[in-house]
Image: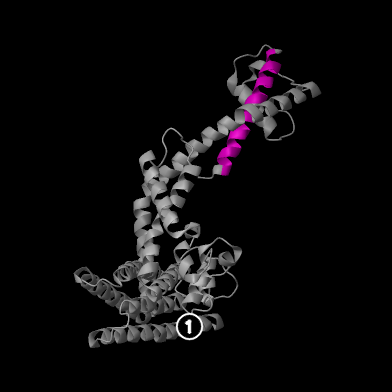
Amino acid sequence: MNLNSYFRQIVLESQKHILSQFIEEKLRDYGIENDEPLVCAIAEHILSGSEGSYKWDDEKYGDVKLIFTNEDIEEILQRLKSFSKNELPTALEAAVTESAGIVVKELDNNWPEQKIFERHDLQVFRDRLELRWHKGLDPLRMLLTCAREISEKFETAFMKSKAKRGIICREVLILLHKRACQTTMEAITLLENGLADGALARWRTLYEIWVIAALIEKHGDDIAQRYLDHDAVAMKRYMDNELKYHNNASKPPISKKIQMEINRDFKTVVDKYGKRFSSNYGWASYHLAQKDPKFQMLEEAIQQNSLPPTYKWASLKVHAGVAGLVRSLGDLTGEHVTLIGASNAGLEEPTINTAITLTQITSLLYGKSRKIENMIELAVLCILCDRVQVECTKATRKLEKDESKLVDD
């Protein structure tokens, strides 16, 4: 459906209607009334811009001369202006609603076939991507499977443990590791579908999880408990934001009872740890000796002295800045192409980063253990991680070589 043509037709019909009113008035002077076909024919002749007289097939009227004075033309323009201001917006709104309904109906009718086509097209793309990248993606998938099994093993041991020291730290590390596994699965899903920028953005979250886990593992139970208690601060911020932007005062999004509980929990932790606990990373303020800790301070505390370059790049893809808009990992041209969908390029960096960071987080679960079983498991993780790096590098080089051949041809 050509909507612009449809709307132009509405305007044209409006002009024709107003002009027809004047033509009817002029014809009455010749005793001609209630002849709608004649009126419409004359109006169309005038609006077409044709010059010369107009011949009507019915000769019963004889010659008729219609004269439009300057006053008539001014009146027509005033009526058109009034119509455009008062009636046309309503007519266009109705037309938009009707047209949208027609388009949606066409989509509904065509979608079953379109969905099958798009699904097939996506599967073909995924098969090609898998053929090129499977040697790098498979060890990452195996790495995730191993990490999950290790997580389950440590959680089972944790549930049976009667230890009194390090219990809170171990609990938090297991929770963070579980989230790391889920985040890795999200990254793999994006990689399998050729969305390298999205996968790198998920790695950014994975990296932050690792930094936090490493800091908690370093300082033990006290900071781990503060990390858990900081949930009260997060909930307080969530509630305040919800209430700030909620317009329906008669039915708040959070019940009064829940509001009271959140405010009470927030006051409890602030009274316990101090005002600086309410900052974004306030749970780490005491151990970092900082009033308002920033993420980079968390990195420095675990001897991760600076943000890795890819972290900054990943941040660009999370936010809506122009750098993330005009640059993409999936662009092989180097011409700042903004992708509208998937690409089989750019998977190397997010795949390797995800493998390295998941290995780092998983290794934290072992602590200082020197059990042979644990050492073997760690060695397996490292072998798989190394394989990811080697195979992804090979796949990237081959892709660049293949692309270069296409350009040369």
Residue appearing at x 50%, y 82% in the figure: 400
Which amino acid, mark 1?
A: Asp
Q: Which of the two residues, 230 or 356, is positioned nearer the viewer here?
A: 230
Query: In this view, which residue lies farthest toward the top?
Result: 31
* Relative side of 186 to 316, left or right: left
| Residue 279 x %, y % | 50, 59
Read off the magenta span: 4-28
Check if residue 27 falls in the magenta segment.
yes
Quarter of image, res 76? top right
- Indicate left or right for 162 with 21 as reference: left
Q: Nearer the viewer, residue 279 or 275?
A: 275
Q: Position of residue 271 (x, y in %)?
A: 44, 54
Q: Residue at the spot x=49%, y=71% of the render?
A: 288
Residue 179 image point, x, y percent: 35, 66
**Residue 5 inside the magenta-drawn segment:** yes
Q: Residues within 10 Å of mark 1 (few under 14, many from 20)?
A: few
Residue ID for mark 1: 402
Work out whether residue 262 or residue 71 is closer to the camera in this orientation and state it: 262
Main secondary structure found in the magenta portion: helix
Q: Is residue 55 above or below residue 312?
A: above
Q: Is residue 102 visible?
A: yes
